[in-house]
Image (spheres, rainbow, N blue to C red):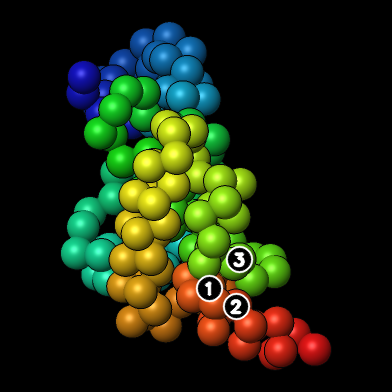
Amino acid sequence: MPDIIQTLRDTYASNPAAALNMLPELFKQYDEGKIVVLPDKAHEEIQMVECALQITLYDWQKAYIWGGSGYMAPGRRTGKTLAHMIKLCLSKGEPINLFKKENTRQYVDEWHGTQYLDWYRHNLRSVYENLKRQPLHLRKICFTREAAEKALEDKK
């Protein structure tokens, strides 16, 4: 499917009245998260995240992570879990203690059984450690008992 914005521009250039007929499709794509409008500060953070993880995020992931949309691509192996992990790392709030597997359950994106908790925790830690290499404001996530105890002491 061609880019709706470019199609709209081309149509408007040749026939402005016909461009009006395209607005319902434009609004539909916006509602589905296919058209991304990000806050100004997001562009710099996106570059840092992509650099740290050596990836290029999809537009829908950018919109989901930086608050522009609740849309997530359907199906498996689409990047939903990675987007969820990045969003969790960039979120604000109290430190998260994940040194116990049972604590992980409240933060996972989906429930796929107990073995998924270990997989999720392991991969979240990898994402978190890579993001820490950039000057991003990350939420404190503790993966060891020692880190959790230190976070508790720092809070006092």
Tag 3–tag 1 contact (CB < 8 Å): yes
Graded by Cα atoms within 10 Å as few (under 14), some (14 to 19) or many (20 or more), the crowding at tag 1 reads some
Q: Which residue is mark 3?
A: 96
Along the viewing direction, whichever of 105 and 30 lies nearer the viewer: 105
26 or 8, which lies in front?
A: 26
Residue drawn at 70 percent across, 69 percent down = 94
Residue 62, percent from left and from top: 40, 49
Image quadrant occupied by the N terminus? top left
Sequence order check: which comes first, mark 2 or mark 3? 3
Mark 1 secondary-structure assignment: strand
Q: CA distance from mark 1 to mark 2?
A: 5 Å
Q: Amino acid at mark 1?
A: Cys
Amino acid type, residue under disc 2 in the picture: Ala
Mark closest to the chain's N terminus, 1 or 2: 1
Instruction: Tell me if residue 93 can be seen.
Output: yes
Dot label at residue 142: 1
Task: Give the percent coordinates (x, y) of residue 88.
Answer: 52, 57
Image marks 1 and 2: residues in contact by CB distance under 8 Å: yes
Mark 3 is surrounded, within 10 Å at the Cα level, by few (under 14), some (14 to 19) or many (20 or more) other residues, namely some
Find numbered disc 3 in the image and state the secondary structure of the residue it sits on.
strand
**Of the residues shown, which amino acid type is indicated by label 3?**
Ile
On screen, 103 above or below 128?
above
Name the residue tied to disc 2: 148
Front position among marks 2 and 3: 2
